[in-house]
Amino acid sequence: CLEDLTSKEEYEELDIPVQPVNTKGTTSADIRYDDSTIDELMKKISFAPHIGKLDFLYRANKELLNQIKLKDAATYNSILTKFNSKRADITTQNEV
């Protein structure tokens, strides 16, 4: 039972990753992504039914987006353009 676990070692024995409490100075360098990850995000953006879902997708993928921004500015800009154009589409649909 998880509430009975008290030490980092016990979590590690169960292969449960333990995040440090103080995240200052940690980086998102561990995030791995490939074309399929990016394609999946683009697909989710396309199917976002409203601005709330779009905002959620952006916040939920913030670390991934930061990693992409550092490694591949063109892909990051493409994703950002997709977010912005979908936002414009949703806003236009709501105005009509």
Image (cartoon, rainbow, N blue to C red):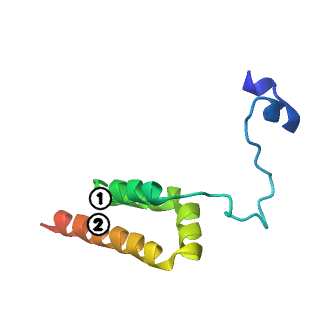
Residue type at the position of mark 1: Ser
Horizontally, residue 41 falls left or right of residue 63, namely left
Q: What residue sits 76% from the left and 63% below the top? A: 26
| Residue 61 percent coordinates (x, y) | 51, 59
Image point (29%, 66%), residue name:
86
Q: Name the residue under label 2.
A: 86
**Residue 90 or residue 63, whichever sits in front:** 63
Percent of width and height locating residue 48? 31, 55
**Residue 63's spot in the image, x, y percent?**
59, 62
- Considering the numbered disc 2 on the image, is that residue within a helix, a strand or a loop? helix
Q: In which quarter of the image is the C terminus?
A: bottom left
Q: Determine whether label 1 and label 2 are within 8 Å by CB.
A: yes
Q: Determine whether 43 is above or below 84 in the image.
A: above
x, y percent for residue 18: 77, 43
Residue under the image location 62 percent in, 58 percent down? 31
**Residue density around tag 1, few if under 14, some if 14–19, many if 20 or more, within 10 Å:** some
Q: Residue 46 carries which label?
A: 1
Q: Can residue 7 be seen in this view?
A: no
Is tag 1's residue or tag 2's residue first in the polypeptide sequence? 1
- Name the foreground residue: 35 vs 94: 35
Q: Quadrant of the N terminus?
A: top right
Is disc 1 placed on a helix, strand or loop? helix
Question: Which picture quadrant has residue 66?
Answer: bottom right
For residue 91, what is the image quadrant?
bottom left
